[in-house]
Image (cartoon, grey):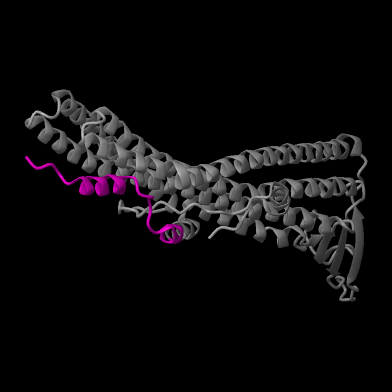
């Protein structure tokens, strides 16, 4: 009986562990397009953007004057006759009043509103960056699942050839039935693994579609990206995080807002003013003599005599909020720095792993499979050795894909931590 050509089996075997993802640039473009789509359509980002716009619209009213008050009425009407011409002080009155806060209060109120608007914008950008990170993570999980399934399918094709090969050897008395059982068992395990992966992929696609704001269940292309060779400088990344991370900028802005709130609370010790202008029109006397109209101008102010009960607690509250914001800023800064260090280490280790797979592990594993195939053909090694060599090559291919994804996830996390612009 003729055996399957050794060269053909070798070619199929090596193809099963070939470097994944032929088009890393296509994967990068696909991922970038998905991030842009999420930034435009994700409902959470839209809600944060709307909140930022609403906060921006509150700035102008915060520093505006109160509406003036227009008054109209009858003044000093005698209740015995209810006539308007009997008493000299009876008149029709028209008045206009305007409340004026103490100088500096309007500017401080506007500054507080501007700080809140800036925080809302920082929250919007932090939400956008977080969703972009989640899109990348979901995409990479799906890409790894797809790549792993591709490697499993190709490994199944190789194992099917192995099974036919050992069956042909067993038929002519040159192999053992145990070799056939081993090949069948490993092939069944691979097929079960493929079923598990195919069950997981729709779940991953649904999560990615949710982040993209899609209603349809259309399949999403997710090729595995090529490993990036970016140099990571931890000191530079820390500086970038302090300068760009929206979360840190919002906390630092909150500290400044608290300082303005303290100053505004202190301003309440100063009185506000109210200007009133009134015009009174009097009726002629009963004998026809003319009564002159009257004009009044009044300046009123409040007396902040209860400052110990009302203003002092507000100042203490503002100081406590400032201290809280400062402590939260320091805590968040420390957390960002710690996570940056962790992710930089993960990225560097993953990059070295990918290089090791490409330069040493996978080439050596391919040579091991070739050698085992040749040796098994002439009976120098048993089938288990050949099978172990092939499965090692398959597992190394899976390991390389996982290392590429781990590297990409670490870089995505670093982008979030440093506030790198998305899209």
The front one of 131 and 226 is: 226
Q: Residue at x 90, y 39 (%)?
A: 307
Residue 281 placement: quadrant: bottom right
Q: Is residue 71 visible?
A: no
State left or right for residue 346 relative to residue 403.
right
Q: Which image quadrant: the N terminus?
A: top left
**Residue 98 sits inside the magenta stretch:** no
Which residue occupies 60% across, 47% down? 414
Q: Residue 100: horizontal and vertical position, in percent? A: 85, 59
Q: Residue at x 44, y 41 (%)?
A: 361
**Residue numbers of the magenta segment:** 1-29
Q: Nearer the viewer, residue 168 or 123?
A: 168
Give the percent coordinates (x, y) of residue 175.
14, 28
Question: Relative to residue 49, is residue 192 depicted above or below?
Answer: above
Rendered residue at 11%/30% (across/down): 170
Give the quadrant of residue 317. Answer: top right
Q: Which residue is nearer to you in this view: 394 or 263?
A: 394
Above or below, comparing residue 65 to residue 167 in the picture: below
């Amino acid at each position: 009986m003729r055996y399957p050509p050794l060269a053909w089996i070798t070619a199929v075997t090596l193809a099963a562990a070939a470097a994944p993802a032929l088009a890393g640039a296509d994967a990068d473009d696909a991922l970038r397009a998905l991030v842009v789509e999420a930034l435009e359509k994700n409902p959470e980002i839209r809600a944060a953007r709307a909140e930022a716009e609403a906060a921006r619209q509150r700035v102008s009213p915060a520093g505006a004057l109160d509406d003036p008050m227009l008054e109209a009425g009858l003044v000093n009407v005698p209740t015995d006759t209810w006539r308007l011409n009997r008493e000299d002080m009876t008149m029709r009155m028209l008045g206009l009043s305007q409340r004026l806060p103490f100088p500096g209060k309007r500017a401080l109120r506007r500054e507080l509103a501007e700080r809140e608007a800036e925080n809302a914008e920082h929250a919007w950008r932090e939400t956008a960056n977080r969703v972009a990170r989640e899109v990348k993570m979901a995409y990479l999980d799906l890409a790894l699942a797809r790549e792993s399934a591709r490697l499993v399918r190709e490994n199944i094709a190789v194992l099917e050839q192995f099974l036919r090969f050992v069956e042909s050897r067993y038929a002519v008395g040159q192999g053992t039935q145990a070799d056939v059982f081993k090949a069948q068992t490993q092939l069944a395990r691979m097929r079960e693994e493929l079923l598990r992966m195919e069950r997981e992929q729709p779940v991953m696609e649904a999560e990615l579609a949710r982040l993209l704001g899609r209603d349809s269940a259309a399949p999403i292309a997710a090729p595995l990206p090529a490993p990036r060779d970016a140099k990571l400088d931890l000191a530079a990344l820390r500086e970038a995080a302090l300068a760009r991370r929206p979360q840190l900028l919002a906390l630092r802005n909150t500290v400044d807002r608290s300082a303005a709130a303290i100053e505004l609370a202190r301003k309440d010790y100063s009185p506000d003013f109210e200007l009133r202008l009134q015009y009174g029109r009097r009726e002629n006397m009963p004998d026809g003599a003319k009564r002159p109209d009257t004009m009044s101008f009044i300046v009123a102010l409040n007396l902040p005599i209860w400052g110990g009960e009302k203003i002092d607690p507000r100042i203490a509250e503002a100081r406590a909020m400032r201290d809280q914001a400062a402590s939260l800023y320091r805590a968040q800064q420390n957390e960002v720095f710690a996570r940056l260090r962790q992710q930089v280490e993960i990225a560097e280790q993953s990059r070295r792993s990918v290089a090791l797979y490409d330069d040493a592990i996978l080439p050596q594993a391919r040579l091991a499979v070739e050698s085992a195939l040749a040796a098994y053909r002439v009976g120098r090694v048993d089938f288990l050795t050949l099978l172990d060599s092939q499965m090692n090559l398959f597992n190394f291919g899976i390991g390389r894909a996982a290392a590429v994804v781990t590297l990409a996830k670490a870089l995505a996390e670093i982008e979030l931590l440093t506030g790198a612009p998305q899209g």
